[in-house]
Image (tube, rainbow, N blue to C red):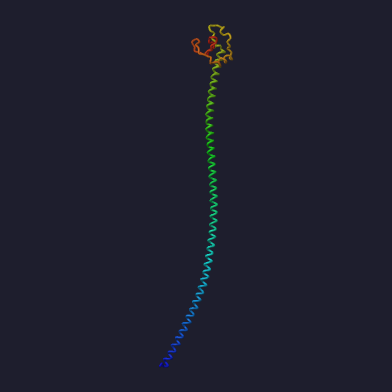
Amino acid sequence: MISDMGFVQVLRFVAYAIQRFHLARNIYSNESVDNEEEKGVEEELGDEYKEDEERDLQALRKAVRIQRERVRKVCLELEKERLAAASTANETMAMIMRLQSEVSSIQMQANQYQRMAEQKQLHDQEVIHSMRWIVLKQESERDILESQLNSCKQGRMIDWKAGDEDGLKGIDCTPNRFIEIWRRRKDLKRVDVDGSDVWGLEITGNFYFHF
């Protein structure tokens, strides 16, 4: 049989156990509530984080699109500049080639004109030399004619042939006649008159004019 003291102790133990049970249950309940609250906070924070992340992602995508559009525009501008530069370079090269062709043509013409000028200069020099030679020849012939004319005037060119005056009949000793005789100088012959080798014109078998 259990004594009263033992029964009281059992009751106390049961009461203590019940108290501990309720305390443990309350603690568990409180922990569950706290866990649920923490979970709710985490869910709210996660939703906000996801929303922020989504906004950031959208902002980044928008920035990337903007940058791509800018890059595309810059590429288009660069392509236009490249085409313009290539066109300008082609035009410049064509102009340079045309100018070189014109310069070459002008140079050829200049060389041709220079050769023509040199040839003309040589020809002119030859003509000048020829004219000078002709002038000198004419002057020499004129001097000879003047000398012979003076000789004719002085009567030193007439061969009297032993005082035969009839041999001079019909002979014209005027200057004009002498010039005519000189023009016929191809008919002159070298003759020996009194031991002198002179030029004479044969008239009626005798050389009456000698030089």
Residue 8 x %, y % = 43, 91
Relative depth, front residue between 30 and 207:
30
In the image, residue 4 sits, relative to residue 27, either above or below, namely below
Relative depth, front residue between 1 and 130:
1
The image shows a total of numbered marks equal to 0
Can you tell which quarter of the image residue 120 is in?
Answer: top right
Relative depth, front residue between 25 and 154:
25
Residue 25 x %, y % = 47, 82
Residue 167 x %, y % = 56, 8
Residue sticking out furthest to the front:
1
In the image, residue 110 sits, relative to residue 126, either above or below, namely below
Residue 99 x %, y % = 54, 41
- Dividing the image into 4 quarters, which one contains the N terminus? bottom left
Can you tell which quarter of the image residue 139 is in?
Answer: top right
Relative depth, front residue between 195 and 35:
35
Residue sticking out furthest to the left:
1
